[in-house]
Amino acid sequence: MREHDLYERFETSYDDADTMRRKGKRSRSNRAADDGEPTRRGRMTEEEKVRVARVREDQLSSADTPEDGDRWSTWGDAEQGPKPHPSWLITELAAVDRELGIVKTGKEADVFLLERAMGEKACLLAAKRYRSNDHRMFHRDAGYLEGRRMKKSRETRAIANRTAFGRNLIAEQWTVAEFAALSKLWQIGAPVPYPVQRSGTELLLEFIGDDEGNAAPRLAQTRPDEDELLDLWRQLVAALMTLSEAGITHGDLSAYNLMVHDGRLVMIDLPQVVDLVANPRGVEFLDRDVRNICGWFASKGLPPEIGDPSALVTTLLDVAGMS
């Protein structure tokens, strides 16, 4: 069952809750009056309710939390990444997850460093958690969501009206979209982090960084020399061609969502990936992606005859079969 189906069932039951509660009170009151019984017989005090709730919570917490971590591995209950799974990934169900701190905060999601361990084996993961707080909106989502229509008209209205239910649906859509995009791109050889799993609005991804938990720098943070700049440019063009062959573009490409790890360019932050054909603004997004990133390379000294954005867009559209 999808999460938003659970939200819908919750909302439906919640709508009827007050009516049922009033009917129940009247029924109990009438029966008590007829039988001559006191109306508060057998009721728990508020203090007793709080005490019982705390006891139950403590029992659940002690039963569900491992001694040496924050939670048990969620691998068995999650949507899992494409096979074959990398050899470094811990897939044992008895593994323990331990949070090591926050890596990055963003408008739509925060990224945390997570260690998944089983005995002497361990791997570092990036836990990307989308949020849908009342005071936050998903930036410029209208254009990206074209072509991602919901099947139910109620869900479509909720998203359009940005109700609490609708914002939860948007968060879920972004999470599902990014996991699907990363899975597809990983399988066709694009330079993206391996998508480990999706559980609700949490993505677990391959951590791009060193064994000590230090994240690799964004491209915008690097100062490449002439040879390094040319090598990174060639990697970028190869990555964009791989995406174009698959009929998609990043949708929000910049030097801030490209990482450089040991000289290798890695593309990240792909919830808004755009289908070049299905989205009526697909070519517009492709053109913007190319011009944004070409501008950064030009500012670092890449010769204009090499980093010509118009020529690159033409090449990518040709690769996508849209020229």
Image: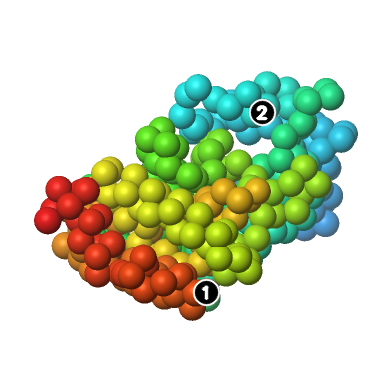
Percent of width and height locating residue 318? 17, 52
**Residue 88 has which mark?**
2
Q: Residue furthest left?
A: 323
Percent of width and height locating residue 298? 44, 75
Percent of width and height locating residue 321? 15, 48
The answer to whether residue 254 of the structure is visible from this angle is: yes
User: The residue under label 2 is which amino acid type?
Assistant: Trp
User: Is 205 above or below relative to 285?
Assistant: above
User: The residue under label 1 is which amino acid type?
Assistant: Lys
Image-quadrant location for residue 39: bottom right
Given this view, does label 1 or label 2 mark the residue nearer the observer?
1
Q: Residues within 10 Å of mark 1 (few under 14, many from 20)?
A: some
The answer to whether residue 148 of the structure is visible from this angle is: no
- Residue wearing tag 1: 300
User: Is 39 above or below relative to 86?
Assistant: below
Taking the image as shown, residue 85 lies to the left or right of residue 286, namely right
Q: Residues within 10 Å of mark 2 (few under 14, many from 20)?
A: few
Residue at the (57%, 59%) spot, across then down: 228
- 131 vs 139, nearest the viewer: 139
- 320 vs 308, nearest the viewer: 308
The tag earlier along the polypeptide, 1 or 2, is: 2
Percent of width and height locating residue 46? 77, 58
Image-quadrant location for residue 102: bottom right
Taking the image as shown, residue 217 lies to the left or right of residue 1, namely right
User: Is 223 above or below relative to 269?
Assistant: below
Residue at the (13%, 53%) spot, across then down: 322
Secondary structure category for the residue under label 1: loop
